[in-house]
Amino acid sequence: MNTKNNTLQSIMDSGLRLVQERGYNGFSYADIAEAVGIRKASIHYHFPAKQDLVQAVLIRYRMDFVHKLEQINLQLINGREKLQLFFNLYRETLENNTKLCLCSMMAAELNSFPEEIRNELNVFFRANEKWIEDVLEQGKKEGELDASMHAGEQAKILIAFVQGAQLLSRTSGEMGYYDALVANVMSSLK
Amino acid sequence: MNTKNNTLQSIMDSGLRLVQERGYNGFSYADIAEAVGIRKASIHYHFPAKQDLVQAVLIRYRMDFVHKLEQINLQLINGREKLQLFFNLYRETLENNTKLCLCSMMAAELNSFPEEIRNELNVFFRANEKWIEDVLEQGKKEGELDASMHAGEQAKILIAFVQGAQLLSRTSGEMGYYDALVANVMSSLK
DNA sequence: GACAATTTACTTACTGGATGGTAGGTTTTT
DNA sequence: AAAAACCTACCATCCAGTAAGTAAATTGTC
């Protein structure tokens, strides 16, 4: 095995970016080959089928994301601040309104994937949900977040909201669209 | 021109369904030909390019949707009830968790479309937004809807929410996911 | 440490099938 | 008659995936 593992990671990086920008059915192995600087057939050595690639990308994406959420939890800040950092994460994903969350894109193309990958998507969304739920509980105890609704239900609403916010912001073409949405939601949770 | 206009409408019906289920890059003219019962080349007679078809479908979809919103406004009901009917419309679109709103799907594949079509998408979303804003204003006057936020901003949040709710509900595989989300949002607007 | 064997990481060349789209002819309706 | 609504036949391109070969790195053996 290549000790640096460069090519494999580059392929996954390109795959990730391409799905986020164009969707699974919107790019080909030729696009990745060009971006990475290798031949098309070499990609098949690492990922025999396109679905293998996207599945690997998805699992890595989820693990990275969960890690980032855990990093937020290591900070000694209140729930309200954590929620803001969560929205900042999704803002970074947008990256100047060029990309969506990988899992939103794949959820849109759900019918292109087998059961196994669909399950992975649900694991991602549920991980988000659970994290938000805990943060909402914390915020409620601190009196910094709205306590009128059950945290679990409120978390589901917020994850739906943030996915839709990304979609609409990119369509609008202005990052200010996302920022305004999040600011208003944050203030409504006071 | 065929007085019945059957084929043209059937092509658009199939095109609409296929985009909603699989996305623009997830179906071909061959799929439509099979569904409609004509040959592939015949579709090109009505819509020379695939983009022409999807643009026509998009415009018809938006006009139909706006019409439905206007029909709701003709009913002598309060703002809160109108908002519930709005969520019911999006529930119908989901159709047993098989399809998404056409414009969510196309927004996800935004980079596959030229400026002209992107603008059409924004027109759709802004029409939704404006309609919800008016309904929220009505509901506030009636004291049936939350008045703590500016109606325009609240409307933007709700349209983001409903798009995300569809996406997550279809991924979950259970219509109850959408229903629970909407019920909780409705109760939070009291 | 030297050298052969093996594995890893690619390459070129190709295939069969799908894709959007075109040319030109035929049937059906007006 | 002529326009509208199809059809067959075809094309160039792209696509995911395969086969077979090569060069380089790693490993086993002495």
Image (spheres, coloured by chain):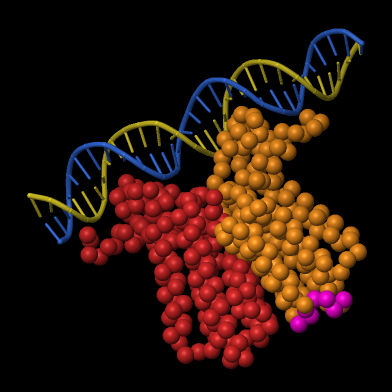
Chain colours: A orange, B red, C blue, D yellow
Residue B174 seen in the figure: no
Where the N terminus of chain B falls, by quadrant? Answer: bottom left
At which x and y percent is residue B152?
59, 75
Task: Find residue B184 and report its horizontal and vertical position in percent.
Answer: 67, 79
Q: Nearer the viewer, residue A45 or A18?
A: A18
Locate residue A35: give its quadrant: top right
Residue at (70, 45) in percent of width and height: A56
Assign the magenta stretch its main secondary structure: loop
Residue B18 horizontal/vertical position (percent):
46, 57
**The C terminus of chain B is located in which quarter?**
bottom right
- Check the image and report above or below for B55 versus D22: below
Q: Which residues are magenta?
A: A142-148
Rendered position, B111 above or below A45: below
Q: Is residue A144 magenta?
A: yes
Q: Judge left or right: residue B4 versus residue C19.
A: left
Q: In the rendering, at what x and y percent does residue A87 appear?
A: 74, 63
**Residue at point 91%, 64% (across, down):** A76
